[in-house]
Amino acid sequence: MFIETETTPNPATLKFLPGQQVMTAGTREFTTEEDAAASPLAEALFSLGDVTGVFLGRDFVSVTAGEGVDWSGLKPQVVSMLLDHFVSGAPLFADAGNGIAVPPPEDDEIGSDPADADIVDQIKELIETRVRPAVANDGGDIIYRGFREGVVYLTMQGACSGCPSSSATLKQGIEGLLKHYVPEVTEVRAA
C-alpha cells in the first residue's frame, strides 16, 4: 500500500490519500483527544502529541499539526500509523453507534424560514455539487447551517477550518457563487 500526501492551503494541515475509501458516507472531524476516542485511528494520531486535528473524508485523512510543529518529523509517523490502520483492516470507529456526524447536531443549526424552502434547496444543491467537491480537494468540508434574511451560514471543517484563506474562500469564492445563482443571497458568514 502506498499513501500519497498533498499539501493544503492551510500550512498546518496535510492531506493523506490511502488509495481506498476512508468513510462510506459523510465526513467526521476530531478537534480534541476526547473526541478522537470515538475512532481508534484518530486516537492513535492524537497520541503522537503534535496532532491537533484529524478530519476523515471519503477517500482521505487530513491531519493538522500544532503551531510550530515541523512536518518533516511528523509526516513519517502519520504515514506509518495510517499504513498500520489500513493494512490491518481495523475499524474506523470504536463503536458503530459513533458513526458519522454530518450534519453536526441540530442544536448547531441556525435554521431558516420555512417560506424560504425553495431558496434553501437551491443553496444546498449548489453547496453539494459545486462547493463541497472543491473544498474536499483541499482536505476539508463545508457544512450548511442555515439561511436567514439573505445570509447563508456555513461551517468550515478539516484543513479549511483553520486555514488563513478560509475567510477569502467564504467571501470571494462561495459568496460570489451563491449570489450569482441565488439572487436572494446577500452574504455568507461563518457559523
Image (cartoon, grey):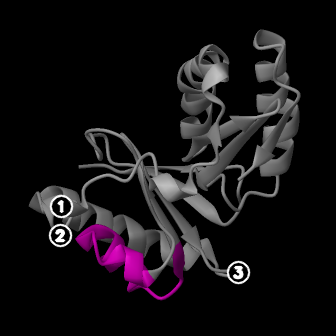
Q: Residues within 10 Å of mark 1 (few under 14, many from 20)?
A: few
133 left or right of 178? left
Name the residue carrying label 3: 67
Of mark 1 and mark 3, the one earlier in the sequence is 3
Disc 3 marks a residue whose amino acid type is Glu
The residue that appears at 11% across and 57% down in the rendered structure is 89
Residue 45 falls inside the magenta stretch = yes
Task: Check residue 94 in the rendering and tell me which mark sits there, or answer none.
Answer: 2
Q: What's the CA distance linking mark 1 and mark 2?
A: 9 Å
Image coordinates for residue 31, horizontal then vertical, percent = 51, 72
Image coordinates for residue 137, horizontal then vertical, percent = 56, 36
**Along the line of sight, which residue is nearer the eye, 154 or 161?**
154
Q: Which residues are magenta?
A: 33-52
The number of numbered discs placed on residues in the rendered structure image is 3
Q: Is residue 161 above or below residue 45?
A: above
Q: Are marks 1 and 3 in contact (CB under 8 Å)?
A: no
Q: Secondary structure at mark 3?
A: loop
Of mark 2 and mark 3, the one earlier in the sequence is 3
Tell me, yes or no, if residue 130 can be seen here.
no
Q: Are marks 2 and 3 in contact (CB under 8 Å)?
A: no
